[in-house]
Amino acid sequence: NLSFNNLTTLPIGLGYLVRLCTFDVSHNLLVELPPDIMSMR
């Protein structure tokens, strides 16, 4: 039962971590994009 519980909670934790990382990356991109666009002009 304990191993089954670990198997079910592991993908949820991984998905949460991936979502957190992708959100962090997209947030960093949104923050760093405007200066690049301004310097390109």
Image: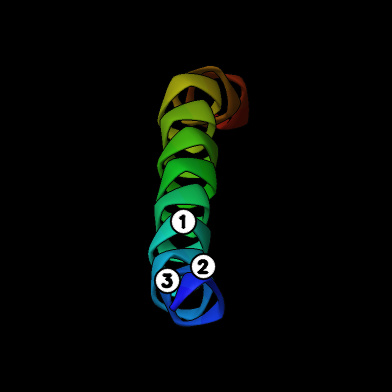
Measuring from the top left, give residue 9's x and y in whole percent.
41, 65
- In this orientation, which residue lies closer to the viewer: 19 or 5? 5
Q: Residues within 10 Å of mark 3 (few under 14, many from 20)?
A: few
Circle 1/circle 2 CB separation < 8 Å: yes
What separation in Å lies between label 1 and label 2 (alpha carbons)?
5 Å
Figure label count: 3
As displayed, is residue 17 above or below residue 7? above
Determine which quarter of the picture holds residue 20. Answer: top left
Residue at the image position 61 percent from the left and 21 percent from the top = 39
Measuring from the top left, give residue 2's x and y in whole percent.
50, 70
Residue lying furthest front in this view? Answer: 1
Measuring from the top left, give residue 37's x and y in whole percent.
49, 30
**Label placed on residue 13:** 1
- In this orientation, which residue lies closer to the viewer: 5 or 16? 5
**Label placed on residue 10:** 2
What's the amino acid at mark 3?
Answer: Asn
Mark nearest the camera among 2 and 3 is: 3
The earlier-in-sequence mark between 3 and 1 is: 3
What separation in Å lies between label 2 and label 3 (alpha carbons)?
8 Å
**SS class, disc 3:** helix
What's the amino acid at mark 1?
Answer: Gly
The earlier-in-sequence mark between 2 and 3 is: 3
What separation in Å lies between label 3 and label 1 (alpha carbons)?
12 Å
Residue that mark 3 sits on? 5
